[in-house]
Image: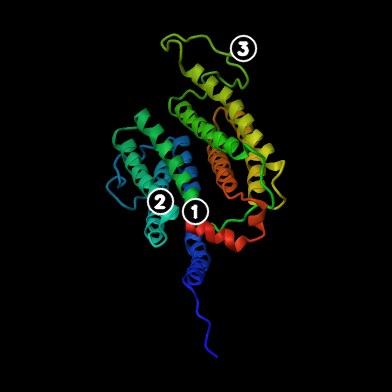
Amino acid sequence: MPLPLLGPSRLSSDRLRQRVQERPARLHQLALLTAAVTFLLVIAGGLVWATESALACPDWPLCHGQAFPHLAGRVLFEVSHRYVAGTVSVLAGLLAGLSFRFGGKVRAASLVAFALVLAQAVLGGLTVLLRLPLVVRVAHLATSQAFFAAVLWTVFATREPRPFERSVPRGARALAGIAALAVYAQLLLGAFVRHTGAALACNASVFTCFGAVWPAPQDGYGAFGPAQMVTLHKGFALVVGALVLAATARTLSRAPAGSLARKLAWAAGGLVVAQILLGAASVLSYLAISLVTAHLATGSLLFASVLSLWFALAEVTAPAAAAAPAAAAIRHAEAL
């Protein structure tokens, strides 16, 4: 009996199914690994600042003229940070190289991430060579978080979609996006507080600044000095907390049990509470290294969770799509 002929549409669908099955397996795992090591890089960078080790190596990219200097004291923190940064750069390069076979959003996300990691390396070198200028240090952190966001974009671009059983309430994704932008802005504001030495400008006061909700102008600083900056950082933390909790509640009100968006919403809600508490504890402890580093790490995790929630909510489709996940996956592959 002759074999039935397969039309072009059938062949095209078969190729797409094969592509959907093979794409996430390797590239998605590599993107997840890159995101995990990037988080370790954030922690390593936080330790460099907290231990005042940024200039432990006066040169760059070598350290005292050596690629492998003796790891002790502050040199240990600075060189470890550089080693992790190098690992992240290699992973980002692999991610960009492997993404070319897929094209679309996968390639775009990976290339953006690679460009940002190169910019991050340059800013890291300038931080040392220019002896810690404020604008370069803040730009260094801003780029690191933007790179983290691009890697997360790659994670979701290579992920096979899991449609919800029902749609989430209108505005949930918009809230998550606004909350993610607010967290990013708060991270930058925190960088200014950290790198200008303003964290203890109000001493160990958490809720007020020397008894005032908004501190009076300080001699030598004009209307906006260190006390005003740290007070702004504290106040904006409440705005960020309200936005994140609103996005969490909005998602949890309709997202089905076990969905990724629901898990991310719970994570974001818990992390924003922990972040506010760690900020208060850092001040009360007069900037204990462990608490300050945990504060930075939790802030980065909070940004990742809220941004991931925004990405996850983009996968929400109509109930009909949930009944045909294979078809939804093929449409997702076509879109990428």
**Which badge, 2 or 1, comes first in the chain's sequence?**
2
Q: Nearer the viewer, residue 276 or 95?
A: 95
Which kind of residue does numbered mark 1 sit on? Ala
Which kind of residue does numbered mark 2 sit on? Ala
Q: Secondary structure at mark 1?
A: helix
**Which badge, 2 or 3, comes first in the chain's sequence?**
2
Which kind of residue does numbered mark 3 sit on? Gly
**Which badge, 1 or 3, comes first in the chain's sequence?**
1
Name the mark nearer the viewer: 2 or 3.
Answer: 2
Residue 261, percent across and down? 63, 47
Residue 98, percent across and down? 40, 61
Image quadrant occupied by the N terminus = bottom right
Q: Secondary structure at mark 3?
A: loop
In the current view of this chain or complex, which residue is farthest to the bottom?
1
Q: How is the image coloured?
A: rainbow
Contact (Cβ within 8 Å) of mark 2 with mark 1: yes
Image: 74 above or below 327: above
Image: 233 above or below 36: above
Residue 237, percent across and down? 58, 27
- Measuring 54% from the left and 40% from the top, which residue is drawn there? 303
For mark 1, does the 10 Å Cα neighbourhood hold few (<14), some (14 to 19), or many (20 or more) residues? many
Residue 291 in view (yes/no): no
Q: Which residue is mark 3?
A: 211
In the current view of this chain or complex, which residue is farthest to the left?
65
Quadrant hosting residue 45: top left
Name the mark nearer the viewer: 1 or 3.
Answer: 1
Q: Which residue is mark 2?
A: 108
Q: Which residue is mark 1?
A: 157
